[in-house]
Amino acid sequence: MALTAVPDPKPARPWVAHKFGGTSVADADRIAAVARLLLARADSERQVVVVSAMKGATDALLDLAARAAARDPSWRERAEALARRHREAAHALLGSRETALHAEIEAEFTGLGELLHAMALLGTAPGAASDFVAGLGEVLSARLLVAHLRHLGRSVEMLDAREVLVVRHGELGAAVEWPETERRLADWRAHHPADCIVVTGFIARDRDGHATTLGRNGSDYSGAIFGALFDAAAIEIWTDVDGVLSADPRLVPEAELVPELTYAEACELAYFGAKVIHPQTMQPAIARGIPIRIRNTFNPAHPGSLIRASASREPPVKGVTAIGDLAIVSVEGTGMIGVPGTAERVFSALHRAGISVVMISQGSSEHSICCAVSARESRRAVEELREAFARELERGQIEAVAAEPGIGVLAIVGEGMAGTPGVAARLFDALARAGINVRAIAQGASERNISVAIAERDVPRALRAAHAGFWLSALTLSVGVVGPGLVGSALVEQLRAAAPRLRESANLDLRVRAIANSRHLLTDDRALDLSDWRAALAGAPPGDLERFAAHVAAPHLPHAVIIDCSASSAVADRYAEWLAAGIHVITPNKQAGSGPRARYAAIRDAQRARGARFRYEATVGAGLPVISTLRDLVDTGDEILAVEGIFSGTLAYLFNRYDGREPFSALVADARARGYTEPDPRDDLSGIDVGRKLAILAREIGMDLELDEVAIESLVPAALAGVGKDEFLARLAELDAPMAARLDAARASGQVLRYVARLDVAAGRASVGLVALPGDHAFAHIRLTDNVVQFTTRRYRDNPLVVQGPGAGPEVTAAGVFADLLRVAAALGARI
């Protein structure tokens, strides 16, 4: 008697295909969660549910086949362990009602045992037999889910895909025999009317009726196939992430969810390494225009990512992805130029050898063709190409066929790239700023993908740089601070306070990952907790500058910055090394800018060679824009004639107050008590610090000046220069008489005393000392601790350009350093 399908009591409900991956059905708890999810939507949709094997089950089954074929008796014990795992899941799902399900599981494993025993006797694992073994995991998962749904009262049928799905295998993988499959499914549905059908993923039969599989990612492919067969309104692929991300979160933790993308965008991302969905999976959906949604069974309320024929073109770049373990294979020779068919011969040879080409690049000169292939196939590729071009190699028309391993390919993907100027420029700019060398470039005419071949070791850094370059995530700077004294401590506190605002307003992620002093090194792989960093530093282990720099220059972060807030010449000795390694250096430490000529030249050479930034605004004038103003004058072609200034806030304070009513020694003691001087005031009174600042400005103009070529007048009497600090402080009064005499002489001619640095560019003279100035001079009326600098130039000859303001103190100096850090960030692409 012929059977007829029972009409659906709710014909308006659409079919929705659900595919659940291995993590979604990993154990009884996850299978129960899947059942709850399906039941919650049963009233609004009819459901075709494709399931994978439990997580790890397919690999375990393939291992059993390999062990049996190798006559390794351990396959029996491992098979029992796998059976026990499924029996325990059945018991957890059904309890005492598991009898029928238990019998089904036992029957499957009995059959498996017999097949494995036969493999062991034969000493081989035939392909069809291996495919049968590999597909058992999906059968077991389907039985578990069906039994649990029925236990919960849901009417459900199980469909073993091998009953209906017929495929043929070719070079492009498994292709569905659609007419035959549709005929078989129609027959099956006539005998199994249901509005909820659980289907085994991954498995099928070939045209000869042999059991086969769809290959890796086959369960996703099954989901799309059955979605198409049931004319589903949507295909939902349930996995363990919220959807398609803009980059691999293992390499770019800041990766963002892409809410919607086109089929083409998803295919490009998947081909270049995105793990959520395989391109082949989408083919049946694309053919029928069925939208695909990627969702998370662990977070089912999240809408996930929607993949469909059309989607928003914003942002222009939807994602950045990469694959590694590649090699560049190149064919080069002048004999290739203008010769038709050379490219065809290259790729025909690779095709005959079964070698897949990931990326192709050829210059318009036709002098060379290169392509990226799997590193493990590169040697064979070279052999095949040398054989194909043996005659040309012998004649010298082809000069080289070679492979270079250690290559990765990075790709940016987005439909909105088409017709948008500057996308490629932004990619190459982001990579260049991160110090990434591009070996080869490819872009299709569709403009939805730009691919670049780079060193594989650079892939993590390149991914982050490109991701941030297109504002898909914050621009991340790995920051290390050396010398957390007064200025360094103030800087760390400023960074802690400003970081959240910069992350929100400028998309800038300043990560302080290391702080070092002479005794301790505090580090964190992601970012230090700065809420109590002083205590953490005090308890940190000892370290050295090598370990410090290596940690800051983490290979997975695109940009590294070292901020030296020490006054150490030994730290300045490292600047050239750090800059040569691509680490940006920012400092208020005057040692580098005023130190030995050879060291200064090495720093500048390293900076130019690698393109790393060296910023030192705070070395002169603390937070005042002294160096930047001077640079602007020079860069715009002005001629600097002279520079004069008061560069010491300490000495400005002393001589602004010194009017004879108090001894000079009392003012020095007062300034020391206020924290205006160094612990040993001679460090200020010697004038060396001011001399260093003048040398820095001289070098900025282009003068080749050493510190010992600056005439420096010390205010410390010779008799006190060599004594200990305590004795010096006890004998401070010995400064009073000579200073009083200088003051009386200045007053007699209506002048004031100021400690001034002077640079006569034409004469090549630099001096620092105490001078008497007219009462109407610009330096005579500054505030107590102000710095002031006066630039006399060709443009500003009659009315010199003056920069004046607070030039001392930890807070303002730290602010100057912070401003340099933000300038570096802006140069790297931050929207500040």
Image: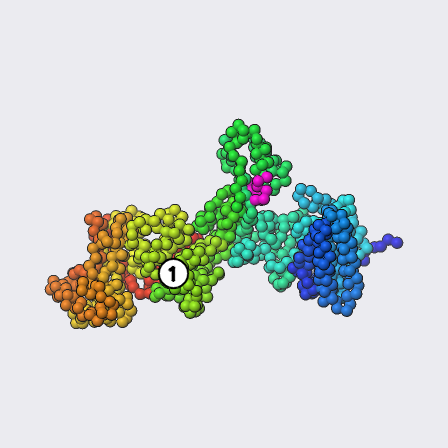
Please state if 242 lies on the left or on the right of 488 as rendered. Answer: right
Name the colour scheme. rainbow
Task: Tell me which residue sits at (79%, 58%) in the image.
Answer: 107
* Residue at x 32%, y 51% (from the top left corner): 599
Q: Quadrant of residue 723?
A: bottom left
Q: Taking 509 as reference, is 628 left or right?
A: left
440 falls in the magenta region: no
Q: Which residues are magenta?
A: 371-380
Whether residue 813 sits left or right of residue 223 in the image: it is left
Q: Main secondary structure of the magenta part?
A: helix
The answer to whether any part of residue 301 appears in the image is: yes
Query: Residue at label 1?
Result: 482
State the image coordinates of residue 612 (x, y, percent, origin top left): 40, 51
In the image shown, does 295 or 233 lie closer to the viewer?
A: 295
Q: Nearer the viewer, residue 516 or 77?
A: 77
Q: Tag 1, which secondary structure?
A: strand
Q: Quadrant of the N terminus?
A: bottom right
Q: In the rendered structure, which amino acid carries the disc numbered 1?
A: Val
